[in-house]
Image: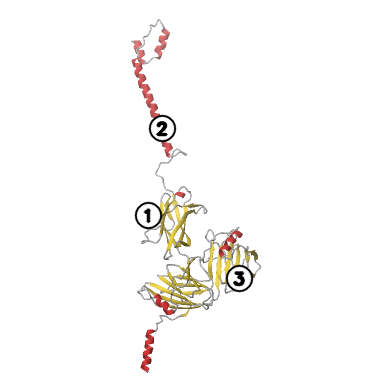
Amino acid sequence: MKVAVLIAVLIAALTSPVLPCELKEVTDENPIKVTQSWVSQGCWSENTSEGREIHFINLNLEKIDWITVDLKNTVPADIILNSNKNVFVFLISNTINTKVYLIRSESKITVTGPNNSKVDLDLPSDIQSDSSSLLDWAKNQFGAVTSFTELIDPQSITFNAGRGHSQDCELQTDFTQGKYLEYLPITSTVEVKFCRIPMPSEVKEEVHIIRHLPVDTMIPRLIEVNFTSHNPATLILQGPDTTTWKIICRIDCKFKSNNSVIVMGRQLLPGFPNLPASYEGLLKYAEADNNTAPASYTEISTDSKRLKVYMNSTTDTDPQLPSTSVQTTTTPDKPKMTMHLYLSPEYRSPSEGIVEVQSNKTVYAEVSTSLSMEGAQLDIENCSLQARALGTEIKSLDIKKETCNPKMCSRRRFSFTLKPVQEHHSQRWDLQCFTAISVVTHPISRERVERGLKVIKAISTLPPREFHGLELGAVLGIAFASFLIGACLTGALWFIHTHTGSTVKRQPVPTIPPASENSSANHSIGSTQSTPCSSSSMA
């Protein structure tokens, strides 16, 4: 009997799956962080209205009913507050340079705190409550908007003010705000378990599995994954049918999911509807390819309708995770665009820094993107030169697409001449090009890339013009005409001289009458005749 039990135990041990790691609660040391508060969209520009900055804060609230706003700006600035639900705002103010505009709509914002200048604004009934409509309305109402920030469930906000660098505040769906605003997230009620799996040395690509286990599977939920990969990696995202994932990759990453996925603003249908719905099944699925192996496994359980996950790929030394309380001015969710400039069509040795080029030369450019997605296509929409000294003067460029072997490069090449600025007195220019990424003819991203140019006027090899106001051809024509006229006159004079001389010689010498007949006439003629005639009379 004991032998039979021992054999059964051994068989069970050999046939049961061996768990490669132990799931544990996530700590600060783990390369994953989950938050219920973040910036979902916005923009930041250099625009002001009559010398005052205009900052729009659109509160998108689900979990909280009150929020603290601390005003620390030192420059004149106005804040426009809007909320999707009733909320109490506790205002802390260290400045008198700020007006607070409260938008009155279906939701009410109640403000308590110092006696700052607070103004109620009625939102017209024909204006929708989405961020894009609110931004357009604010531009028309105030003349300009410095920043627009849509915040998901912040517990507190610190407002510092400040202007950005963009010429206009154009809404970006994946936006991280700059120094003008900081926020603290609410205390998370999300349960996250994580385990790291040792990677075999011969495996080329790591797989990271995230599984969503909500409390109620019938409630639609949005989970945004901000993934930073340091090696080739694939994300496997599994959850109930009511789950939607939004993926933001810093560099190359691939994904597989049984749910809808939002990438670069476009929602894609489930590509892998038959993904296993178990821990063991997902691990085996990740090992289906000989070149891949699971590197981490994460389980997320929450009752929240939306979450944001920050995750780094597994490395020997885990990089520091971004903080959700103080965001940076970078936009990690957007593909990074890079533009290199060359001075030859061979595209060798790209020029660094501000490129110096003669005004009669052709410039060759190459634009690349960090996005690696099957079916994605990069294109150049238009390019222009903006004078640095004048700021607003912009010259459009006619670009010519250059060939690039798809097997050799995945970039977009083009060239242009500097003809629009050849006669311009300004030397310093900023080259600006707008790029577009599309998937199956559907545009999913539009970005701007810039490079500095120093245009040097080409030295002409022609002599300087003597006749100002006349072209070289006209000057040469006049000179040639003058030569012809002079030649004709010279020839005519020579002809008259030679023919007149011959006629004189052939004429008979007149007979001089006797002196007695006309002595006065003879004296007169003798005084006016040439030397031969005088010699003849003397003879």
Number of numbered discs: 3
SS at circle 3 = loop
| Residue contact at pointers 3 and 2, CB within 8 angstroms | no
Residue 345 - label: 1
Image quarter (top left, top right, bottom left or bottom right) of the N terminus: bottom left
Mark 3: which amino acid?
Answer: Lys
Q: Give the mark nearest the N terminus, 3 or 2.
A: 3
Front residue of 409 and 51: 409
Instruction: Look at 39% across and 61% down and name the residue there.
Output: 410
Residue 111 placement (x, y as % from top left): 64, 70
Spatial separation of the CA atoms under disc 3 and disc 1:
58 Å
Mark 2: which amino acid?
Answer: Ala
Looking at the image, can residue 527 be seen?
yes
Residue 496 falls left or right of residue 125: left
SS at circle 2 = helix
Residue 489 placement (x, y as % from top left): 40, 27
Mark 3 highlights which residue? Answer: 85
Quadrant position of residue 519: top left
